[in-house]
Image (cartoon, coloured by chain):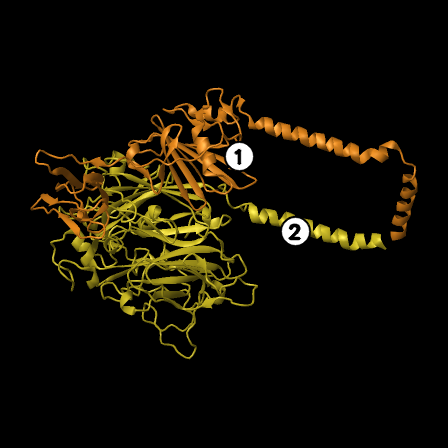
Chain colours: A yellow, B orange
């Protein structure tokens, strides 16, 4: 009888316990097979602070301060706008951004002077990795004689660390312009080293005269992935998945919100210039009067890859996306393609503007799973009955806040049908359209009303359902008052 | 089925009654053998702690990467236990501004999922490259820098022209003292270099900041000196004056210093003494007599630039 008990109870139990032990050990400790790079690792970024130009969606050139650079050894592509944003073509440095050298500007560094990109490069790593960022200030090159040549820093927003590493010049030190040779300290290189044990969405920005420099464009996204996330090898926007706060996702996007008051930019470019619109003279930021609202540095319709303009003409979407990897604001997901379920898309919303932005999405109720690098209290992963998360259609991050929103493409359809009772549509030739299905018809550009040729902004000739995701302070869905524009993008539902 | 098992056991039990000396003392014997085994393992482990005069296991990897470099790659003689020297990763990247090489060695402890990184390069201007948030410490090679943040530690040392950064994200598994010991035992892989897991007792000693500039009295009995604000800050940043003796500061600005053109010296518990220059008035003369001993900090108008005036009796 004892033998029977041993055989029937103890053996299976011990087998179960042993197999549990052996199955959990790799789960807890081993990075996944998809993760090529060993963990932990050191991730080095070379970043330069400088000035430059960009073009607003309505073609107005804008003087900015910003960052340029990227991960060491990874080819760097940037858009060269030149003076007054008359260009926009890309330049590639195959060996990546050079390692900053303390002192005067070197020949290799000079190529990047005056080429600030908006926003700054996405910096990403895995929790536990050491992120090492070398910052050099190349100074202003695209301004006038009166343009200030200020020190710059990088503040790692959301990474809790002491004052010295915090990137606040008043409590630590700043990178001084390298184009003022002969001045003590000019061209110093600051090496920031930090890590985090909290996965999630962070941001970084300059903290020197933050009211000016942040507004001028000195910001970017910072992401810490979990070590096993496939997306940790590529960064966001590359169709790779991962897990955050217990929720699995198939791809992730960055939605970095900011706005611009051209008077600020105009004043930095030339302090003697007259204001462009109602503003104090000299410019006082408490008279903040933004006219451009941006997602990842773009306003609609540029957000859906359409109508890229410069002061000198049009430039290609491909140029922009090559220079801003991971920042594509046109969110796409599939209802069931290969998975047999809707894709789950994680949107990393960051607000670095001065105002709270009520971002309203049509067709979805994304689930808020985290805010400010911490799991959202009531957002338990599926399987736990209590607290399935806060599902809303309008999210209003305040300045400095980040949110992780999970979109379930299993809740939408890739088709759209009019009521069979109504035959009110005509095709491009003016003939009535009898079918009720929107699918398959060319898409008129909501900006110009012109029927756009098939392109990647409508994902080919079979137009799937597009859902706007826009700022519901609707005046912020304009470019200087012209609707639609501003913080306005689309969610593209693929079959 | 169960009956059969029981039968076999019973038969065994009968057999055991004939007690042989082996059976009687087997546990002692087995225990003794195991004990000996453990002791010898311990002895091997202890022997491994002692420096071994031989080529380090990673030396051949280092030597083959050495060709074409303008400096010798350094490896530490001391390595915390569990880190695999043989499986060390070596990466040479031409990431310098003119394609200068930068060498990165990665040692891993696969069991503990920990890593130590050694980065080596020749900085163009070592003094102006700052590991932000670090404190100066004493190392075998002179002044080094220690940076501790959360679970991460880094040490920078300069050996001749070469700068070596040793860092690990795994404080708790590795101590900063161990990293310092690694820094202190750096040497060329090309020699027969001693290597070990043994660590000498070591403490980390900070380096005090340099003494303040002592202001001298001029012929008129006034403590007169030049204070300059540059984009790099105040020069001198720290200075010392005598209490009760008039002070005359010739304040100038060099370069674009934005907020640095106006500032204030704050008397402890007293009023501030303003200092300011403008484009029209590039030299500003400030005269006062300090009447209270102690540290008088001074700041620019937005607190970017700082310094300290020390008033002594």
Q: Chain of mark 1?
A: B
Q: Specify few, some or many for label 2: CA neighbours under 10 Å numbering under 14, 14-19, or 20 or more.
A: few
Task: Identify the residue at horizontal 51%, vertical 67% (top origin).
Answer: A387
**SS label for mark 2:** helix
Quarter where residue B187 is shown: top left
- In the rendered image of this protein, does residue B62 appear above or below residue A157? above
Q: Nearer the viewer, mark 2 or mark 1?
A: 1
* Mark carried by residue B44: none
Q: Which residue is mark 1?
A: B83
Where does residue B7 sit, x and y in percent of width and height?
A: 91, 48
Q: Check if mark 2 and mark 1 are on a common chain.
A: no
Where does residue A245 sit, x and y in percent of width and height?
A: 49, 57
Separation (CA) of disc 2 from disc 1: 28 Å
- In the rendered image of this protein, does residue A370 appear above or below residue A393? above
Q: Is residue B235 visible?
A: no
Q: Are marks 2 and 1 in contact (CB under 8 Å)?
A: no
């Amino acid at each position: 009888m004892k033998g029977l008990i041993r055989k029937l109870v103890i053996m299976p139990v011990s087998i179960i316990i042993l197999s549990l032990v052996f199955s959990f050990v790799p789960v807890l400790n081993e990075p996944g097979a998809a993760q090529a790079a060993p963990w932990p690792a050191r991730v080095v970024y070379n970043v330069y602070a400088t000035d430059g130009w960009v073009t607003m969606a309505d073609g107005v050139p804008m003087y900015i301060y910003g960052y340029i650079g990227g991960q060491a050894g990874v080819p760097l592509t940037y858009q060269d706008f030149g003076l007054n944003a008359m260009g926009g073509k890309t330049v590639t440095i195959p060996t990546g951004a050079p390692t900053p050298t303390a002192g005067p500007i070197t020949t290799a560094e000079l190529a990047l002077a005056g080429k600030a990109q908006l926003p700054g490069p996405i910096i990403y790593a895995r929790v536990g990795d050491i992120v090492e960022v070398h910052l050099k200030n190349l100074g202003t090159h695209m301004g006038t004689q009166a343009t200030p040549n200020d020190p710059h820093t990088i503040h790692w927003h959301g990474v809790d660390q002491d004052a010295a590493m915090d990137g606040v010049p008043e409590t630590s030190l700043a990178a001084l312009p390298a184009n003022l040779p002969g001045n003590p300290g000019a061209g110093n290189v600051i090496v920031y080293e930090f890590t985090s044990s909290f996965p999630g969405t962070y941001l970084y920005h300059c903290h020197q005269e933050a009211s000016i420099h942040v507004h001028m464009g000195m910001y970017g996204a910072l992401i810490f992935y979990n070590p096993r996330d496939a997306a940790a090898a590529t960064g966001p926007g590359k169709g790779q998945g991962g897990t955050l706060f217990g929720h699995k996702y198939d791809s992730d996007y960055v939605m970095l919100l900011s706005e611009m008051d051209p008077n600020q930019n105009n004043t930095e470019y030339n302090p003697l210039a007259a204001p462009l619109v109602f503003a104090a003279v000299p410019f006082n930021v408490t008279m903040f009067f933004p006219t451009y609202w941006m997602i990842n540095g773009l306003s609609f319709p540029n957000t859906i890859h359409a109508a890229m303009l410069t002061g000198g003409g049009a430039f290609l979407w491909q140029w922009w996306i090559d220079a801003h990897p991971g920042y594509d604001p046109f969110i796409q997901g599939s209802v069931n393609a290969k998975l047999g379920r809707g894709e789950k898309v994680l949107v990393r919303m960051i607000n670095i503007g001065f105002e709270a932005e009520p971002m309203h999405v049509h067709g979805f109720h994304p689930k808020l799973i985290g805010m400010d690098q911490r799991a959202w209290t009531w957002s338990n992963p599926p399987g736990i009955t209590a607290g399935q998360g806060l599902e809303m259609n309008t999210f209003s991050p305040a300045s400095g806040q980040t949110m992780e929103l999970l979109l379930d493409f299993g809740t939408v359809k890739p088709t759209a049908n009019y009521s069979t009772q109504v035959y009110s549509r005509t095709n491009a030739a003016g003939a009535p359209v009898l079918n009720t299905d929107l699918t398959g018809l060319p898409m008129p550009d909501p900006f110009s009303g012109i029927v756009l040729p098939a392109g990647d902004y409508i994902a080919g000739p079979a137009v799937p359902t597009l859902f706007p995701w826009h700022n519901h302070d609707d005046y912020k869905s304009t470019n200087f008052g012209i609707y639609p524009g501003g913080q306005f993008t689309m969610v593209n539902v693929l079959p | 089925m169960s009956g059969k098992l029981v039968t076999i056991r019973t038969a065994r039990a009968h057999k055991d009654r004939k007690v042989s000396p082996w059976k009687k003392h087997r546990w002692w014997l087995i225990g003794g053998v195991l004990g000996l085994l453990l002791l010898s393992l311990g002895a091997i482990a202890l022997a491994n702690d002692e420096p071994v005069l031989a080529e380090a296991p990673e030396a051949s990897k280092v030597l083959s990467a050495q060709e074409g470099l303008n400096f010798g790659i350094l490896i530490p003689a001391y390595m915390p236990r569990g880190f695999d020297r043989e499986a060390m990763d070596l990466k040479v990247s031409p990431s310098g501004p003119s394609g200068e090489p930068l060498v990165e060695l990665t040692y891993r402890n696969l069991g503990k999922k920990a890593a130590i990184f050694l980065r080596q390069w020749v900085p163009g201007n070592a003094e102006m490259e700052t590991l932000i948030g670090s404190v100066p410490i004493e190392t075998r090679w002179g002044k080094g820098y220690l940076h501790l943040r959360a679970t991460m530690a880094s040490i920078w040392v300069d050996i001749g022209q070469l700068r070596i950064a040793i860092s690990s994200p795994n404080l708790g598994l590795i101590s900063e003292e161990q990293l310092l010991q690694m820094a202190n035992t750096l040497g060329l892989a090309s020699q027969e270099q001693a290597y070990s897991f043994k660590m000498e007792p070591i403490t980390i000693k900070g380096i005090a900041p340099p003494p303040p500039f002592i202001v001298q009295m001029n012929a008129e009995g006034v403590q007169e000196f030049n204070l300059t604000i540059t984009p790099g800050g105040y020069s001198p940043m720290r200075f010392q004056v005598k209490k009760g003796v008039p002070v005359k500061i010739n304040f100038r600005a060099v370069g674009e210093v934005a907020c640095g053109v106006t500032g204030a010296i704050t008397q402890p518990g007293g009023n501030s003494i303003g200092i300011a220059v403008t484009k029209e008035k590039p030299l500003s003369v400030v005269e006062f007599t300090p009447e209270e001993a102690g540290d008088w900090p001074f700041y620019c108008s937005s607190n970017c630039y700082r310094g300290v005036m020390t008033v002594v009796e």
